[in-house]
Amino acid sequence: MLKHERFRHILTALQQQGQVQLSPLSLALRVSEDTVRRDVDELARQGALTKIRGGAVLPSPIPTAYQAREQHDAAAKQEIAQKALSLLTDGQLILLDGGTTAGWLARLLPPARQLTVATHSLPAATALLSHPGVEVRLAGGRVHAPYRVTLGPETVDFFRQFRADWCFLGAYGLHPTVGLTVANAEEAAVKRAMVQAAKHVVALVTPEKLGTAEPYVVCEVGALHTLITSDAVPASDLAAYRQQGVRVL
């Protein structure tokens, strides 16, 4: 089988199944696993898929610049943010990551709420300045202009000091077997620190990110307390998360 035919088979299987493994592909294509691995490597360089251990999954379809991400699927993000607000009680300490859905949560928070919010998101911190009852704790570190967040060891250390009630995380992808993933290693390190610093971890995930993955794993699905997504997502697409003990809203 020629290379372009193998590529077509791999991508078709990926579209149909959402995930492929090297060993079954090797048998189906009648080539060695090394050949399949090289094919997957090349397709990953082209952006057609995301490599995982022993196989590949669909890549996340979202844009990378903050302003573009903020407006991308904005209705779903606002729906998710409103659901997240229902979890909060005055007096709590919450952690907000730098994702745009968490940014919408900050923007939609009623001004009268009494909370402490620790974040590394510049837009979220700015949005909360008009809330007199909210104490904002902003992480130090290196400012990453495209993401509008702080990153680096100082940011990680900042979150390690907390024991928060809630941690709200966005993601570039959430896959039942791969977990919650992002596209940047430093961002992944910050999110891991946030996961470890909270009693309850909430993933804020728009429908198109479900079943996709990026190269850097933040946590396994089992580390999540709650998954919040749009009501438009079919129940069948959420079953794999519920089976791992995750509450879905």
Image (tube, rainbow, N blue to C red):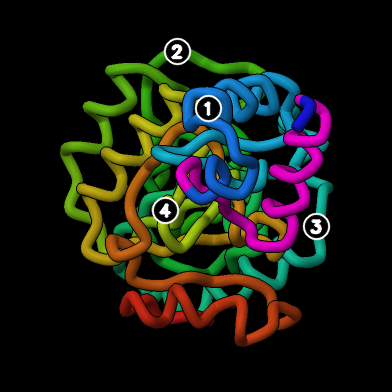
Q: CA distance from mark 3 to mark 4?
A: 23 Å
* Residue lying furthest top: 142
Q: Residues within 10 Å of mark 2 (few under 14, many from 20)?
A: few
Mark positioned earlier in the residue sequence (1 or 2): 1
Q: Compared with residue 191, is residue 128 higher up or lower down, i.e. above or below?
A: below
Q: Residues within 10 Å of mark 1 (few under 14, many from 20)?
A: many
Residue drawn at 63 percent across, 58 percent down: 18
Q: Nearer the viewer, mark 4 or mark 1?
A: 1
CA–CA distance between discs 2 and 4?
Answer: 27 Å
The residue where tag 1 is placed is 37
Q: Is residue 51 left or right of residue 115?
A: right
- Which secondary structure lies at badge 2? strand
Placement of 16 over or under 87, stated as above or below: above
Overall secondary structure of the magenta section = helix
Q: Which residues are magenta?
A: 3-23
Q: Quadrant of residue 92?
A: bottom left
**Tag 3 or tag 1, which sits nearer the N-term?**
1
Q: Which mark is residue 74?
A: 3
Kind of residue sitting beneath label 1: Arg
Q: Earlier in the sequence, mark 2 or mark 3?
A: 3
Disc 3 marks a residue whose amino acid type is Ala
**Residue on which disc 2 sits:** 142
The reply to whether dot 1 and dot 3 touch (C-beta < 8 Å) is: no
Q: Amino acid at mark 4?
A: Gly
- Element under label 1? helix
Q: Residues within 10 Å of mark 3 (few under 14, many from 20)?
A: some
**Is residue 48 rendered to the left or right of residue 152?**
right
First in sequence, mark 3 or 4: give its number. Answer: 3
